[in-house]
């Protein structure tokens, strides 16, 4: 019994050590992520301030984009031309440059590939959109 007690003591000490180390590692990883995110936000804000100084028109609009199960896109309530489907997401960037939105609301059918949603979000990020809301919904009648 005496040998078993010392074994449990060793296990308890190891548990405490691993808990302390994992807490420190998690804190350091969180700080790194926060710094990276803060840098991106600062760069976006700096770009907006430079545009304001140049006197360019800054958009304060919200952008609403829907993607149907067939891959058709609807932007701001009006369908995009039939040639512009999910496969040609990059063409949407030109239309978004004119709107210059600050927030994007994206509604995508669940059958649309995740990569398409990511492409749209990347385009919005490159344009300086500061906030996103994504909702995945099944098509009506399914």
Image: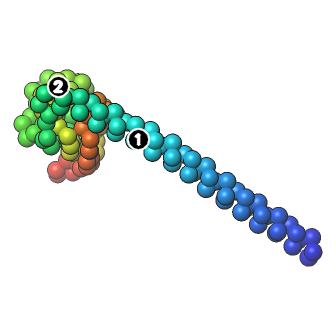
The residue that disc 2 covers is 54
**Residue 50, placed above or below residue 134:** above
Residue 65 x %, y %: 17, 40
Residue at 57%, 47% in the rendered image? 28
| Label 1 secondary element | helix
Q: CA distance from mark 2 to mark 1?
A: 26 Å
Residue 81 x %, y %: 9, 27
Residue 78 x %, y %: 6, 36
Q: Quadrant of residue 12?
A: bottom right
Say which quadrant the N terminus sits in: bottom right
* Total tally of numbered discs in the picture: 2
| Label 2 secondary element | helix
Determine crowd level at label 1: few under 14, some 14-19, many 20+ residues with C-alpha closer than 10 A.
few
Residue 112 x %, y %: 28, 38
Q: In the image as oriented, which residue stretches furthest toward the right?
A: 2
Q: Is residue 109 visible?
A: no
The residue that disc 1 covers is 37
**Residue 77, placed above or below residue 12:** above
Residue at 20%, 40% in the rendered image? 102
In front: mark 2 or mark 1?
2
Left or right of residue 43, residue 36 in this image: right
Q: In the image as oriented, which residue stretches furthest toward the front?
A: 53
What number is the disc on residue 100?
A: none
Residue at 13%, 41% in the rendered image? 61
């Amino acid at each position: 019994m005496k040998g078993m007690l010392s074994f449990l003591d060793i296990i308890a000490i190891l548990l405490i050590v691993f808990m302390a180390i994992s807490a420190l590692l998690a804190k350091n990883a969180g700080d790194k992520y926060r710094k990276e995110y803060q840098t991106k936000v600062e760069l976006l804000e700096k770009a907006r301030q430079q545009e304001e100084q140049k006197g360019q028109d800054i958009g304060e609009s919200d952008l609403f984009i829907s993607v149907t199960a067939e891959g058709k896109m609807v932007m701001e309530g009006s369908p995009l031309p039939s040639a512009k489907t999910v496969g040609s997401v990059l063409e949407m960037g030109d239309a978004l440059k004119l709107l210059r939105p600050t927030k994007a609301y994206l509604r995508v059918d669940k059958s649309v590939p995740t990569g398409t949603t990511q492409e749209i979000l990347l385009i919005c990020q490159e344009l300086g959109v500061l906030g996103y809301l994504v909702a995945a919904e099944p098509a009506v009648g399914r």
